[in-house]
Amino acid sequence: MGAPPDSGRLEEVRFAFTADVSLMVRLLPDHDEGTLRFQVSNFDALETVNADFPAHLVGSDLLDQLARWVIGEPNEFLKTAQNLRRVEA
């Protein structure tokens, strides 16, 4: 319950702004290990997510899950990831 309008107390402040945030997906192959690292920036939060996958598992199903993540739909992209690491911006 807020204060009456004539109380002189600050109840709320709102700011409107346009955020300048870029999203990125980078694929980094490790030929010796036979893996692909997906480096994903700023999808769910201001963070970078590193996730490794065996190269033979990177196919249509996994990329469909990545696409779902890109557009904000529920996904299981990180479910089978190895060496999962999140770094806040």
Image (cartoon, rainbow, N blue to C red):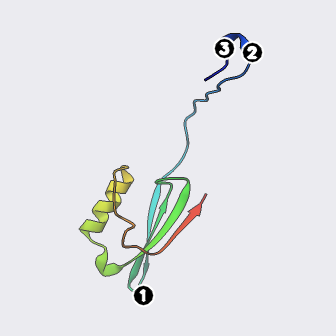
Q: Quadrant of residue 89?
A: bottom right
- Which numbered circle lies on residue 4? 3
**Left or right: where 50 falls relative to 57:** right
CA separation in Å, label 1 and label 2: 65 Å
Sort mark 1 into few (<14), some (14-19) or many (20+) by Cα contacts within 10 Å: few
| Residue furthest out toward the left | 60
**Left or right: where 61 falls relative to 78:** left
Residue plotted at (25% across, 67% down) = 61
Residue occupied by mark 2: 8
In the displayed structure, 87 sits above or below 53; it is above
**Left or right: where 85 falls relative to 13:** left
Quarter of the image for the N terminus: give it. top right
| Residue furthest out toward the top | 6
- Amino acid at dot 1: Glu
Nearer to us of marks 3 and 1 is 3
Residue 51, how many percent across, how many down?
Answer: 45, 71
| Residue furthest out toward the bottom | 32
Residue plotted at (40% across, 73% down) = 81
Residue plotted at (49% across, 69% down) = 50
The one nearer the camera, 39 or 86, is: 86
- Amino acid at dot 2: Gly
